[in-house]
Amino acid sequence: MRVHQIPHMLILLILMFGMIGCDEDERVARMAEEHARQQAAQSQQMAQLQQEVTQGARELVEADSSVRKEIISLQRDIQAERTEIGRQRDQLEEDRRRLAAQQHRDPIIAATIMQVGMVVACVLPLILCWYLLHREPAQADDAAVAEVLIEDLSAESPLFLPAPAERRAAIAYEESPSDSEFSDADQAAI
């Protein structure tokens, strides 16, 4: 019986292995399907990530481009400001030179004006003296002026000098009683 049993056992074992093999094939098939689904999901996720990376790279390139444009604009502004500062520095240097020259020249001009003024002040009296010495003698004019003054002094109502009574009062006022050096006779003559 043992001999008959061996083939049965063998058949039974083969059937069991076959059944186990079928279950294993099913399980392998299910795992393969699940793995294929996971692979498809991962591929889909990778594609989505790739799209996001591409979109991010595009945005990064656009941002970099705009930043570069801003940097170029700022560099132009800085260059314009440097040019303006250079122009102002040159203008300031020119003003400084002009002021230095003026400060050097002004005292010379002032000294020259003072010297010319002194020369004119010294020469004017000499010119006046020369004029008076070299003019034609005007004897007739002097005589006429003297005659008018004499007539005015002797007139009862003089035109140029105060009247004799007013002259006496003015002289008396100017003299104080302690300073009187004139005698009464001298005062009566006046």
Image (cartoon, grey):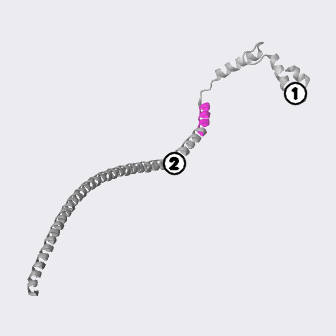
For this orientation, the residue located farthest to the front is 1
- Residue depicted at 43% across the width and 49% down the height: 94
Q: Amino acid at mark 2?
A: Gln
Q: Which residues are magenta?
A: 122-133
The residue that mark 2 highlights is 103
Q: Tell me which secondary structure the magenta stretch mostly adopts.
A: helix
Q: Is residue 1 magenta?
A: no
- Residue depicted at 21% across the width and 62% down the height: 42
**In whole angstroms, how far apart are the C-alphas of marks 1 and 2?**
61 Å
Determine the secondary structure under disc 2.
helix
- For discs 1 and 2, the disc positioned in front in the rendered view: 2
Q: Is residue 135 above or below residue 76?
A: above
Which quarter of the rendering shows the N terminus?
bottom left
Q: Categorize mark 2 by other alpha carbons within 10 Å: few (<14), some (14-19), many (20+).
A: few
For this orientation, the residue located farthest to the top is 156
The residue that mark 1 highlights is 176
